[in-house]
Amino acid sequence: MTVEIGDVAPDFELPDQHGTPVRLSSFRGKNVVLVFYPLAFSPVCSGELCGMRDSFPEATSADDVELLTVSVDSMFTHRAWADAEKFEFPLLADFWPHGAVATSYGVFDEDKGLATRGTFVIDKGGIVRWKVVNPIPQARDIADYRKALAALA
């Protein structure tokens, strides 16, 4: 299954780096930037998430935007990474069933056992309004997220 622009975003509940359950549908009324990434502590993923921490205030300080990041890493790995990098946004563990949420969005690489670099901007009503899926080694451009969010305003 692949999620396309105009689709209702598949709902899910995953634990964050603190073990707190996070349900996508609980953010109705906010725009959500849903970012799938392959693995914590890897060079490209570190660059992308540090970039979001440092250069994407729309998703870390805006009242109407929520940033959710997802990988197949465990919540314990996410906690260590969040502590090391000072990430304050949710790092969600799609650990078990392994990659189930990434699969539901069409961004799970079965051969490698991890998510590709998929990003979905979901509007306040839960509809996917923008998406990009990059190959595992190719970083995404945060400026594209800004444009997608601006188009929702």
Image: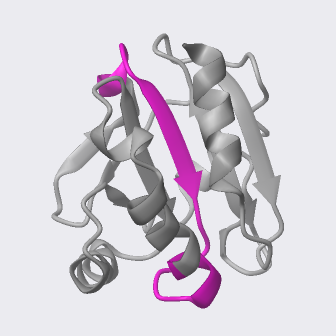
Residue 103 is left or right of residue 101, and the answer is: right
Q: What's the residue at 25%, 80% (across, down)? A: 76
Q: Is residue 42 magenta?
A: yes
Observer-nearest of 12 and 142: 142
> Looking at the image, what colour scheme do you see?
one colour
Residue 65 pos. (x, y %)? 39, 30
Q: Is residue 30 magenta?
A: yes
User: Which residues fall within the magenta stretch?
Assistant: 26-46
Quarter of the figure that contains the N terminus: top right
- Kindly indicate the quadrant of the structure image that contains residue 54: bottom left
Quarter of the figure that contains the C terminus: top right
- Kindly indicate the quadrant of the structure image that contains residue 140: bottom right
Res 28 seen here: yes
Res 103 seen here: no
- 65 in relation to 90, above or below: above
Observer-nearest of 128 and 140: 140
Residue 129 is left or right of residue 31, and the answer is: right
- 109 in relation to 76, above or below: above
Q: What's the residue at 76%, 74% (across, down)? A: 136
Residue 153 is left or right of residue 135, and the answer is: left
Residue 16 pos. (x, y %)? 27, 58
- 42 in relation to 79, above or below: below
Q: What's the residue at 56%, 88% (across, down)? A: 42
Residue 106 pos. (x, y %)? 74, 48
Q: For the image shown, how many numbered marks are present on the structure?
A: 0
Observer-nearest of 141 and 42: 141
Q: What's the residue at 70%, 19% (across, down)? A: 7
